[in-house]
Amino acid sequence: MSIDSMFVHKMWNDNELSKMVDGGVPFPMLSDAGGKVGAVYGIYDDNAGVETRGRFLIDPDGVVQGYEVLTPPVGRNVNETIRQIQAFQLIRESKGTEATPSGWKPGKMTLKPGPELVGNVWKEWKTEMAFD
Amino acid sequence: MGEELGVSCARPTGGPVGESVKTDETEKEKNIFKEVVSMIKVGQKAPDFTAPAYHKGRFINVKLSDYLGKWVVLCFYPGDFTFV
């Protein structure tokens, strides 16, 4: 979503993005003229007149589970976004009985929060796992 | 001929053509009436919206609540044809 019109979205997709991705952008490119939606989400930069790089993860109940906001010159890490969705999906499937510690990726161990875990995380989770 | 501009956006100078404007006064006045922008909170429902969109050759209207039941990644970015 950006402040550009859907017509500009079409030109960008048809003339540039479709040369990067076969078939063009697969998801809807939303237009937020005047930044009204961006203002509600707190990421519209009123002085510059554009949206900043805000990224929101919204779960199937419509609840915001996470967000990240960057200033314009730095691009996002898509793999990290996907990793976070995978983590939130695992938590949701476990109905909150599992938690993903720092550095978690699909296939890596999770923690089972409960009284026995208090003071014992060090036995299950090692610092290196945060950087793995 | 105008000088070459750094990338910027259009905005009113705050005065009529050909007349000088005391910019700091008008800025101050504007700020008085500005609403406080607050960040939305994690763990709370996302604000719903509808927005026109371009999707696979068609112009459509997208409503966030139509995506209930699915995971949604909502991405904002400064502008089409930007570099990052």
Image (cartoon, coloured by chain):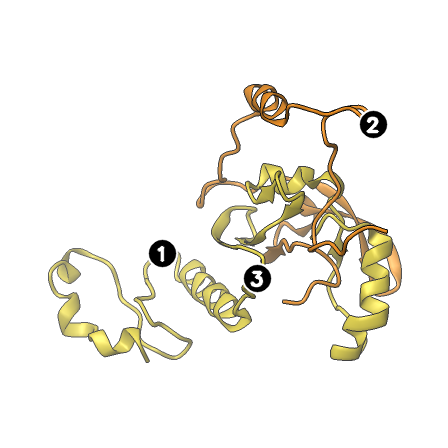
Query: Regarding mark 2 in the picture, which secondary structure is present there?
Result: loop
Left or right, A104 with reference to B34: left
Asked if residue B73 is positioned above or below residue B17 in the image, the reply reads: below
Q: Which mark is residue B17?
A: 2
Q: Residue at x 87, y 54 (%)?
A: A7
Q: Which residue is mark 1?
A: A96
Left or right, A57 with reference to B2: left
In primary-sequence order, the first of circles 3 and 1 is 3
> Could one spot residue B47 in this view of the protein?
no
Please tell me whether mark 2 or mark 3 is closer to you in this view. 2
Chain with colour orange in the figure: B
Asked if residue A74 is positioned above or below residue A31 in the image, the reply reads: below
Q: Amino acid at mark 1?
A: Gly
Query: Regarding mark 3 in the picture, which secondary structure is present there?
Result: loop
Q: Which mark is residue A73?
A: 3
Q: Amino acid at mark 2?
A: Val
Q: Nearer the viewer, residue A117 or B80?
A: B80
Q: Residue at x 17, y 66 (%)?
A: A121
Where residue B23 appears, x then y in whole percent?
Answer: 63, 27
Q: Amino acid at mark 3?
A: Pro
Q: Quadrant of the C terminus of chain A?
A: bottom left
Image quadrant of residue A90? Answer: bottom left
Left or right, A116 with reference to A99: left
Image quadrant of residue A78? Answer: bottom right
Residues marked 2 and 3, same chain:
no
**Shade representing chain A:** yellow
> Could one spot residue B56 in this view of the protein?
yes
| Chain letter for mark 1 | A
| Chain letter for mark 3 | A
